[in-house]
Amino acid sequence: MKTTQTQLGQGRNERFSSAGFILAAIGSSVGLGNMWKFPYITGEHGGAAFFLLFIICLILIGLPLLLAELAIGRAGRGSASTSFVKAGGPKVFGRLGLLQVIAPFLILSFYVIVAGWTLHYAVQSFSGSLYVNSDYSGQFGSFTQGLMPLVWQAVSVLVTAIVVGKGISGGIEKFNKVLIPGLVVLLIILMIRALTLPGAGEGVSFFLQPDFSKLSPEAALVALGHAFFSLSLGMGILLTYGAYVDKRQSLGTATLAIGAGDLVYAFIAGLIIFPTTASFGLESNAGPSLVFIALPAAFSAMPFGAFFGGLFFILLAIAALTSAVSLLEVPVTYVMDRWGWGRGMSVTIISVLVLLVGLPSVLSFGVVPALMDMGGKNFFDWLDFITSNILLPVGGLITTLFVGYFWKNAAEAAGLKSGWFRLWLFMVRYIAPVLVVLVLLHTTGVIKF
């Protein structure tokens, strides 16, 4: 039976509770980037001074766009593509909105690979086998250049598919209601462990001591970009989740709660990473080299390191899988809404396609030499670059232009009082588009300092 506008998001198993929606949205934004990138860029660009700048950027670009995506989704009750038209917008936005379906599908194809890495490392850490050989760079290279990542990729896709296949309230909401509180517990345990390490204070100072001399136009653009990406904007997730939100839910309150959750997670991540790296004299580089090479060296040297290392990788796995679930729901909702497929068939077909499309990425670390060096990047890195630096900012720009200039029912959909609505509309119409364009120009290398 065809899934229609009135049916999508209206069934008993296709609607979030208020708390479940907020936890699911936080789960989508609590990803790997805040753990392996945010602490690094904060320390590099002025510590607490940059953190304050990040909060300002979150208010200027993050929260207005977040509310816009939620409002479009709830008004349209469709997918990341069809909601633009169902909410009353021009048909051209239905086609433009396809970018916000394509982007999360492509991101998911390589995101589940990294999720698989975290699961593998959790098993290796708890078993102690990760620490038998101290050449952690060699271990990581040997692992990613082999065939085991294919197995863990499949495991990650299977877990994600099972959750999404059970629906909104029965799958995604229940999954996040269990994992997000668990993630909070793990964050607190690991933060306490990190802060009690010898020399941890030096790392905390590097992270939080304000150095306003390091603030620059470059730092402002980095903060803008991270405020945009850390909330999962421009990839159709919040727009899709909005389709399953009850009309009584305050979107303004939800927006603040999601933003606060993202901010707290990023802050605690810094209180885990920097004290740990400072205590053991490690370089706090951003990216996989920090997580899979530097930190295992730290865990190997601390008491009960195998246990705390295992907890850390479980934490990363939770962050990765909650984001993966959100990413999969976007194309699943699209095919359900566009072609009337059932959820089970939609999840199965999209998941198989995710596995197939992800094969070049997982094989680009050494299994297939031709995929390793494609103009200075391997296939994995190129896909990451195109989606994160081009598709997502363009998707965010489409949202701001739609709400700011083409959507007549924005006031009613956002549910804001007149004063707040005028402020929000001003931000979305005049401020956010300029900032999104700056993010796009910076991430693609057009603007450099």
Image (tube, rainbow, N blue to C red):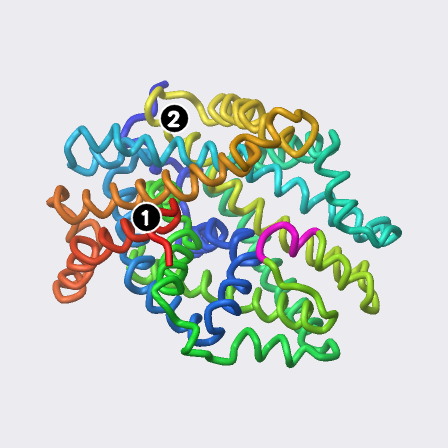
In the image, residue 433 above or below residue 156: below
In the image, residue 359 above or below residue 326: above
Left or right of 411? Residue 114 is: right
Disc tally is 2
Residue 44 horizontal/vertical position (percent) = 51, 67
- Identify which residue is drawn at 38% across, 33% down: 101
Left or right of 56? Residue 413 is: left
Mark 1 vs 2: CB contact within 8 A: no
Q: Looking at the image, which is closer to me, 230 or 184?
A: 230
- Identify which residue is drawn at 72% across, 70% down: 281
Q: Main secondary structure of the magenta part?
A: helix
Q: Is residue 389 visible?
A: yes
Residue 126 horizontal/vertical position (percent) = 81, 53
Callout 2 amino acid: Met
Q: Which mark is residue 336?
A: 2
SS state under label 1: helix
SS state under label 2: helix
Judged by depth in the image, the label closer to the viewer, 1 or 2, is 1
Category of crowding for the residue at label 2, using alpha-carbon neighbours closer than 10 angstroms: few (below 14), some (14–19), many (at least 20):
many
Residue 217 horizontal/vertical position (percent) = 34, 64
Callout 1 amino acid: Leu
Q: Looking at the image, which is closer to me, 340 or 303?
A: 303
Question: Which segment did they paint magenta?
Answer: 286-292
Q: Which mark is residue 264?
A: none
Question: Is residue 214 found inside the magenta-colored segment of the image?
Answer: no
Residue hosting label 1 = 441
**Quadrant that contains the N terminus:** top left
Q: Is residue 314 visible?
A: no
- Identify which residue is drawn at 80% across, 63% down: 305
